[in-house]
Image (spheres, rainbow, N blue to C red):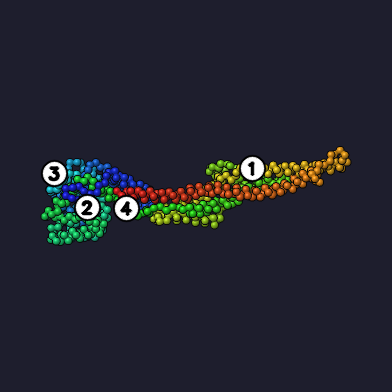
Amino acid sequence: MSPLLKGRAHGATVSPERLAAASGALAAAVDAGGRELPATESARAAQVVAKVGQRTGIAGAHTVVALAGATGSGKSSLFNAIVGADVATVGVRRPTTSTPTAAVWGDEPAGELLDWLGVGSRHLVEGEGPGGQLGTLEGLVLLDLPDVDSRESSNRDEAARVLELVDLFVWVTDPQKYADARLHDDHVAALAAHEAVTVVVLNQADRLAAEDVTRCRTDLVRLMERDGVPGATVLATSVASGAGLDELRQRLANAVASRATARARLAADVRTVAGSLGGAVADAEPEVDDATRAELLEALARAAGVPTVVDAVVRDYRMEAASRTGWPLSRWVHRLRARPLRRLRLDGRDVRVTESDVRSVLGRSSLPPPTPAARAAVALATRRVADRAGSDLPVPWSEAVERAATPAGPEIGDALDQAVVGTSLHARPPVWWRVVGVLQSLLAAAALVGLLWLFAYVVAGWLQLDTVVPDVPRVGALPVPFLLLFGGLLLGPLLALLAAWLAAVGARRRGAVMDARLRASIARVADAEVLAPVRLVLERHAATRTALRRAAEV
């Protein structure tokens, strides 16, 4: 602790705006962290935020100083010596002090502040009181607290309650109890972050020789350093001899003059609780890499039956192509066969399907349910997402990531089915289908004309009308009707075979296009049902971590 120089106000300066920003950041951290933060520390943080608002909202510029210490340390005698009057009760019987007593310097009303502190016993100090300190004590509210180690639990609780609210601590100890473990472990160590608002007094120094006072002060400095308050300045006082009282009053005057002690205490509270919550968050947030996301999408695609649907698209394309480009005399066979997409109830053409339509009209598709292996693959993929996103996070956060990555119940199955049903699986028929279809029609017509032509010649010969019927035109040695008939019958099936080969190529391309469409729909489901909830947890973690860092920097 930097010693306060005589006649000067020196110490940590925290502006009202900076304190308000830090308190707001702490509140934001608690809100963002939610149940992933430790309940005790979160409750403590909420109390600190409320205290900052209440303390800064009280009118006036008072500085509240509490004399706190163990039984027999002489707090009340020291209190009376600073006030210059026998305000606090001093006696041999313990405990003597059971309720806080306040002494107020100055004319500015302190009723609202004392009501907030819950201090009923009040004394208005006339003038400055004894002492020759530089500066005024006007605005000082000095409290004499019950013993922190009182045999009465109500006294201990009251002392602890008021210590949570005051601006400056004056720890009063004596040569017999200055090393008491309970004092250091239960109180001093717990307030290590309040170095700038803590004063340590070794009272009743008149009981020791000068060299013993020096030795005790040195040992007390060592103990304070062990408690987390390095470089602490310890004042040795004696009410009987008056030693050290002027220096103590000077420090109180400096604290009053700074007008920032209250904000320094509140800032220390914010900093302390933000530090305690800092262990509940990691230094950064992991990310779901592309490989993990791809594995999730593949597992969901298989669970949704995408390979089955793509296979149906391919077969449906080839059947449609055969019905349009096949040999006209055999096309009717293809029309008798059931269409694969129709069996899956996925044969709607460019129909916009809403969720309500799916539920009320179409219902679920006729896709077979996912196999146990597919369900296990989905579970494994979501677990890997949780493991990747929750790695290096504290346990409550990693568990929150795992819950977010694992949708409850059948929701994800319904979402996947609706994604498949809502994806258009048809596209504009290829132009070559129409061209080949026209050629097939021409070849069929040619074969029919050739057949009828030949039949006409056969009938004419049977009726002995050879002299009337003109000669059959020929191409070389072959008659034209024969060429038309057998050319149509030969070229039609050959063209159908060529069209079937082209349809197989086109079916694979169509399958790839529909596979991409379906996987895009599956990706939206994955983002909405798995990845978005995980990202939300990570965003809350980042907001909590950032807010705690801002609060701890006050």
Real-space CA distance between mark 3 and mark 1, rounded to the nearest whole angstrom = 105 Å
Q: Name the residue under label 1.
A: 431
Q: Which of marks 1 and 4 is in front?
A: 1
Asked if disc 4 and disc 2 are in contact, CB closer than 8 Å, the reply is no
- Determine the secondary structure under disc 1: helix
Q: Helix, strand, or loop for circle 4?
A: helix
Alpha-carbon span between mark 4 and mark 2:
22 Å
Q: What is the C-alpha distance between the residues marked 1 and 2?
A: 88 Å
Mark 3 or 4: in front is 4
Residue 275, which numbered label?
4
Q: Mark 3 points at which residue?
A: 127
Amino acid on which disc 1 is placed: Val
Query: Between disc 2 and disc 3, whose residue precedes?
Result: 2
Check disc 2 and give the amino acid type.
Answer: Ser
Badge 3 or badge 1: first in the primary sequence: 3
Q: What residue type is labelled 4?
A: Gly
Name of the residue lying farthest toward the top:
468
Identified at 13% across, 58% down, the residue is 206
User: Mark 4 or mark 2, which is nearer to you?
Assistant: 2
Q: In this view, does 377 lie to the left or right of 26?
A: right
Three-letter code for the amino acid on which mark 3 is drawn? Gly
Q: Give the left or right position of residue 527, taking residue 508 as reference.
A: left
Residue 384 image point, x, y percent: 47, 56
Query: How far apart, in angstroms, are the residues tagged by discs 2 and 3?
Result: 30 Å
Q: Badge 1: few (under 14), some or many (20 or more) residues near its Cα, within 10 Å?
A: few
